[in-house]
Image (spheres, grey):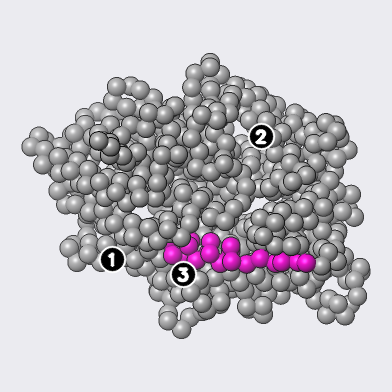
Amino acid sequence: MEQKRLNPFFEPYNTLHDTVPFDRITLNDYEEAFVEGIRREDEQLEKIINNPEKPTFDNTIVYEEDGKEHYYDLLSRVSTVFFNMLSANTNDEMDALAQKIQPMLTKHANDIRLNEKLFQRVKHVHRFHRILTKEEKQLLDNEFDGFVRSGALLDNEGKERLRQITEEASMLSLQFSQNLLKDTKAFSLHITDEADLDGLPETARSAAAQEAREQGLEGWVFTLDFPSYSPFITYSTRRDLRKQMYMAKNTLCYHKNSEDNSEICKKLINLRLELAQLLGYPSYADYVLVKRMASKKRNVYKLLNDLINAYKPTAEKEKTNIADMAMRHCKREEMTTRIEPWDTPFWAHKLKLKKYKIDAEMLRPYFELNNVIKGVFGLATRLYGITFKENSNIPVYHPDVKAYEVFDKDGSYLAVLYADFHPRKGKQSGAWMTEYQGQWIDSKGKNVRPHVSLVMNFTKPTDDKPALLTLGEVETFLHEFGHSLHGIFANSRFESLSGTNVWWDFVELPSQFMENYAVEKDFLQTFAFHYKTGEVIPDELIKKVTRSRNFNVALSCLRQVKFGLIDMGFYTRTKPIGENEDIRELEIQAARNAELKPNNARRLNTCMTVQFSHIMAGGYSAGYYSYKWAEVLDADAFSMFKLKGIFNQEVAQSFRDNILSKGGTEHPMILYKRFRKKEPTIKALLKRNGIKM
């Protein structure tokens, strides 16, 4: 008799380090696991609320947190895998299933947070509890606040409306992401005449030729994936084609078709405002910032305005320098006396080459991906003593993915790290870090170690060349690897407080901190070897990199500030967006103080908001300023390493002990001051960027 196949989510994985058995999971397994996972959590909830004993931390709060010991925490397991796949390796069937699953999960989450009996138990424990450790107290406060911020104090009518808001918002966020992925992957520029490749470096041509072959086409294909788009917009001498690429990129989800996100954005912003006001806050930003280092809107605007005041004069000069370069080297009638957005990267590159004698393509031969991997991992070894060992026996979800075991300096097992480097059809653009298993310590004292994943979209190898990265891609690798270290070093009792489970304006500190190493000679010369000759990157080339580091730094800063202002503009509203109000016009008004004239969005009919995943579907709503907030922290933190030595293991150990391993167990400023012995200031950032006030 044939034995019935058991859903792999329903049993112990029985894999090395209990890693996800991707090779055994089928599409049909997900829905069954979601349904059963919800049933099991409902069953567990009933046990907690019907416990006849007086509510205590141990039978109410910890039981819920330690629930993963029961039934292998099925819902968490399947949710983690499914939604990670939805970003990194989706297809039409997965997308359709997500539309079905998302409402179930939102309803289930509301059923827990709006359960009056459960809240009364949590409320009792919050008022009357035994002496708690610092971490236990943080968990209890988070749990109580979580219920209140999820509507537990609302009347029945308010609770019902909150359910409707959260269910609608979750579906809209999902639709936003799916529309953006579809629209991004739908565009390609197919070139059949080699003359149209004029100006493009050989690496870009080879990659485009390979993309064409993979699509069964002759010639060359360019896409909106960053490794394809960026070289084209930077190097192509075909202004008309640069415009075509630019307009495709900047009008994504803004075409009044089924993938248009304009109305979705308006609905999401209005729903979040209504949720905040339902809970007693004037705006969604007021609601969010209670749980942020910035704490208040005025502090966010102070940072953004300070940056505008410090950087805008320099940015004006940088923009003028690019325009002057363009006007001097092209026919005036060709430019129609105006430098367009698709001209800026092209002429900025020309100016940088003239001024510093450096070009991104000069560095590519020294950044072969396998060597970069060794360099980045080697940096962690040098700082923290940890080591990485690739293990092909750990199942992965795509052949592109590599799996590594991570070992601590004493040789003990520390984590699993997945690395997914290249773009493909079912993968979202950008780069991110995520987890398949968080770190926590179970009731028996076992330290359950994390399974961390790096997902990026780097230049792919071709038939005749390995993957050769740009310096920008190396910086991205270091950034996401910094997030990974935050997860890898996690050492908290409770998973909800471990690793990257910190306030949003603190979470970017470990990642942006690591980017500092990208231009350090002593780091570069540990791995940057020419892929053909084996020659180490020359000192002179590194000097050029260092000298050019702050090229257009003010324009780059204002771009981030502009995005932060757009975000705050939408989420500081106290009145909903009207039916006849235009999302692009609101975007333009919000960002006007950081804008360098002329504003192009209205004239060119482009829009950022409709593709701004961070603030619509990525958790950064009223929080995009976090990148600049954390940049102040990272510059200040790295100045400590510059003072003591960039590989100083004593300082690195302090950074690990006080920040990377602590997660969200204490207020982030307490953790930062414990490492730095003082509060951060903007001075280190201004010094690093060569900006004087």
Furthest residue in direction top, as rendered: 410
User: What separation in Å lies between label 3 and label 2 (alpha carbons)?
Assistant: 38 Å
Q: Which residue is mark 2?
A: 373
Relative to 31, is 417 on the left or the right? right
The one of 616 and 194 positioned closer to us in this rendering: 194
Residue 438, position as x, y percentages in the image:
41, 36
User: What separation in Å lies between label 3 and label 1 (alpha carbons)?
Assistant: 17 Å
The amino acid type found where label 3 is placed reads Cys
The one of 418 and 669 positioned closer to us in this rendering: 418
Q: Nearer the viewer, mark 3 or mark 2?
A: 2
> Is residue 673 visible in this depiction of the protein?
no
Q: Is disc 3 surrounded by few (<14), some (14 to 19) or many (20+) residues within 10 Å?
A: many
Q: Residue at x 66, y 55 (%)?
A: 214
User: Could you say whether the residue bearing mark 1 is in a helix, strand or loop?
Assistant: helix
Relative to 35, is 98 on the left or the right? right
Residue 420, position as x, y percentages in the image:
57, 43
The number of numbered discs placed on residues in the rendered structure image is 3
The answer to whether mark 3 and mark 1 are in CB contact below 8 A is no
Q: Which residue is mark 3?
A: 265
The one of 622 and 426 positioned closer to us in this rendering: 426
Q: Which residue is mark 1?
A: 164
Relative to 585, is 29 on the left or the right? left
Q: Which contiguous range is marked in magenta? A: 174-192
Query: Up-down: is 148 above or below 680?
Result: below
Residue 26, position as x, y percentages in the image:
40, 46
Q: Is disc 2 surrounded by few (<14), some (14 to 19) or many (20+) residues within 10 Å?
A: some
Q: Which mark, residue 458? A: none
Q: Is disc 1 surrounded by few (<14), some (14 to 19) or many (20+) residues within 10 Å?
A: some
Q: Per the image, is 555 magenta?
A: no
> Is residue 530 visible in this depiction of the protein?
yes
User: Could you say whether the residue bearing mark 2 is in a helix, strand or loop?
Assistant: helix
Give whichever of discs 1 and 2 has the lower sequence position: 1
